[in-house]
Image (cartoon, rainbow, N blue to C red):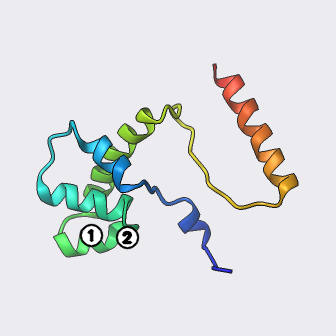
Amino acid sequence: MVDITPRELLMKRMTRDQFIQATSRLTMGASTLEIAEGVLVDGKSQSDYARAKQITRGAVSQIVNRVWKIHLKAINIPDKFVEVTAVLPEHQAFIVKQWEKEALRSHK
């Protein structure tokens, strides 16, 4: 079993195909795309990119969030909602699915 920290569970991640789709209509420089892809697809840290590119962590965060928001709209996730992937015992998974249905119902 692999140990995963709570921080890793909350990381924004997407597949390379999702990244290509999200950035296809954006005007971004090569370095900016490299940062966004490195964080969102490859799972590298925003802090590492900030140091390597000699920019602020806030600037990296803005780059990542720009692409992430487009991705969420593309997969129809409402604002202030997050997508979660988890491996749970069957009874807990059932409860989480019920929470999802309830949240979506109350959001409409």
For the point 26% across and 44% down, which residue is it? 23
Q: Position of residue 93 (x, y in %)?
A: 79, 51
Residue 45: mark in rendering: 2
For the point 37% across and 58% down, which residue is it? 40
Q: Position of residue 82 (x, y in %)?
A: 56, 44
Name the outermost residue toward the top. Answer: 108
User: Is 48 on the left-hand or right-hand side of 97?
Assistant: left
Q: Nearer the viewer, residue 105 or 52?
A: 105
Q: On the image, which quarter does residue 53 sit in?
A: bottom left
Disc 1: which residue = 49
Do residues under tags 1 and 2 come within 8 Å of each other at their CB atoms?
A: yes
Q: Nearer the viewer, residue 34 or 80?
A: 34
Q: Amino acid at mark 1?
A: Tyr
Q: Nearer the viewer, residue 58 or 105?
A: 105
Q: Amino acid at mark 2?
A: Ser
User: Is 68 on the left-hand or right-hand side of 49?
Assistant: right
Count of numbered badges drawn on the protein:
2
- Mark 1 vs mark 2, CA separation in Å: 7 Å
Q: Is residue 11 above or below residue 79?
A: below
Q: Position of residue 99 (x, y in %)?
A: 76, 39
Q: Mark 1: few, some, or many residues within 10 Å (few <14, many ≥20)?
A: some
Q: Quadrant of the N terminus?
A: bottom right
For the point 71% across and 61% down, which residue is it? 87
Q: Is residue 45 above or below residue 63?
A: below
Q: Is residue 103 above or below residue 1?
A: above
Name the outermost residue toward the left. Answer: 29
User: Is 69 on the left-hand or right-hand side of 32?
Assistant: right
